[in-house]
Image (cartoon, rainbow, N blue to C red):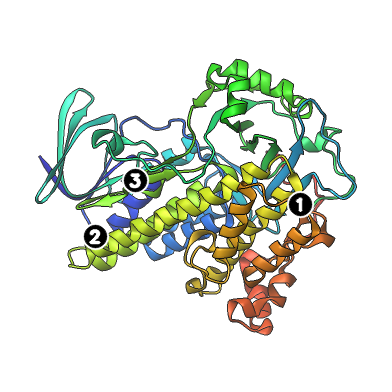
Amino acid sequence: MQDVEVAIVGSGFGGSLLAMVLHRLGLRVVLIERGKHPRFAIGESTTPLMNLLIEQLAKKYDLPRLLPLTTYGAWKQAYPNVVCGNKRGFTYYHHKAGERFQRQEGRENELLVAASPHDFVADTHWLRASVDNFLVQEAVAIGVEYHDETNITEAERTPNGIVLRGDKRGTPYTVRARFLIDATGPRGFLSRLWNLPEQPFENYPRTQALFSHFTNVGYCEHLPDFAPTSPPPYPVDAAALHHVFDGGWMWVLRFDNGVTSAGFSVTEVLAQELKVSEGEPAWRRFLARFPSIGSHFEKAQAVERFFVMPQVSYRAGVMAGENWCLLPSAAAFVDPLFSSGMPLTLLGIERLGRLFGEHWNRPTFAEELERYAQASLQEADGTAHLIGASYASFANFPLFTNLSMFYFASASYSEMARRVEKPHLITRFLGLDREDYAPKLQNVCTRIRRGEITDTPAFAQEVADAIEPINIAGLACTEKRNWYGVDLEDTIQTASKLDMTQTAMRNLIATAEWAQFPSPTPPSQGARP
């Protein structure tokens, strides 16, 4: 029997990264994987906040080889064989069934929100098979013990910890751990073995998803339906590309090896109409329903099987107990909209690093573990509240556009608060700890779900007023007509919201690597492999 302090089951990016953090803290850690890398995984789009979290974890726990993963340019220089894609922002187009997409003069049916000023410091899309494989190799390289092709079939709680039993390639395998962490994803191994209770998100629509990986996916900028008449703030395909419609939305994420991740998530009613459970035939019906998306995928070929998720959302009723806990990715999953899954996991890893670093072997550990669980589930619930309201607003795209400002305001403020070393200003995802902001978000989401809000100038002003305390990115500005580039002058002018003077903010931006613009380049560059 092997004895360790912490056993982590699941070696996706979260499990591997957490194993490295705990190993650096001096704990005896074992990382256990049922399968073998490289393997397919979903959850592929990063955000500025996520990349900054990786940067801060890498610096705090002496993991310098992770730093290149935080920007597209550094990644391509350091690890050209680890597959990623360029993500300059968030692109949204609104579609109606049976109609081609037609650009409107006021851009009412599109939304572009830039996340970075240029390619080198851009975010990335992760080909998870490649990135997860890289991360588990990094964990092994620094000394983490790793066992793959190991199937855990029993987790016995004892007075001194938890005993895991199973087999490794047919040979009996047993490990005794003082603490167990489940990093196997929603409805993971602990949920199954211990029959952990579920607690569905309140008033959240039931959704289904269908997705795969493809080659030969067309570029929107090359299609007459989508081609912009003036240069956009970033190449529209070098982004998390969203096609939004009544009843759901579609994602399109490009990797530099010519592969594109694409899929859609739809409400139960639309899923039944499309017969999502049939897989590829449902995909063809979906493309026929939206002609411009069909043109987008006219020459595309699937290079993976079609994956069906009959129920996308999941929330555990309990996230932690004596000698065990779930990672946020195992405790809850809402929807890929707004690329929230990986940042929530990293916030959980940051909290667990602090928990083990400051409270392990101390009487305060159990109390702090409960706080970790409460914070993580609160963030999952808040995310579900926003995304549930988003589904209710998809048919009315201007309504969704205004609602999305809550996400972009809180995300940009969270990132900048950390960059200026004032993370106490906003400690929860979506600003759920901000009393001058979170209740307004809650109120708006509730009213949208109830059908009490329609798109009006009055609602647009209500949103602008609600996000004002944390709006440092010039959002909710009607003059920008739904195109939001990176303008750091907006941040300078609103520096007081970060407890800084404009002079101090201007000086910081003048010297910060993440804020520097390169020489001007044509807008079409950056989207290409």
| Quarter occupied by residue 170 | top left
Q: Tag 3 or tag 2, which sits nearer the N-term?
A: 2
Q: Residues within 10 Å of mark 3 (few under 14, many from 20)?
A: some
Q: Secondary structure at mark 3?
A: loop
- Residue 11 placement, left or right of 93: left
Residue 455 - label: 1
Q: Secondary structure at mark 1?
A: loop
Instruction: Give the number of the mark in front: 1 or 3.
Output: 1
Residue at 60% across, 32% down: 266
Q: Tag 3 or tag 1, which sits nearer the N-term?
A: 3
In this view, the residue in front, 253 or 190, is: 190
Q: Residues within 10 Å of mark 2 (few under 14, many from 20)?
A: few
Q: Residues within 10 Å of mark 1 (few under 14, many from 20)?
A: some
Instruction: Give the number of the mark in front: 2 or 3.
Output: 3
User: What amino acid does circle 2 point to?
Assistant: Gly
Q: Secondary structure at mark 2?
A: loop
**Mark 2 and 3 residues: CB-CB less than 8 Å, in contact?**
no
Residue at 66% across, 73% down: 509
User: What amino acid does circle 3 point to?
Assistant: Gly
- Residue 455 percent across, percent down from the top left: 76, 51
- Residue 486 percent across, percent down from the top left: 72, 61
| Quarter occupied by residue 185 | top left
* Residue placed under numbered mark 2 in the picture: 26
Residue at 52% across, 55% down: 50
The quadrant of the picture occupied by the N terminus is top left
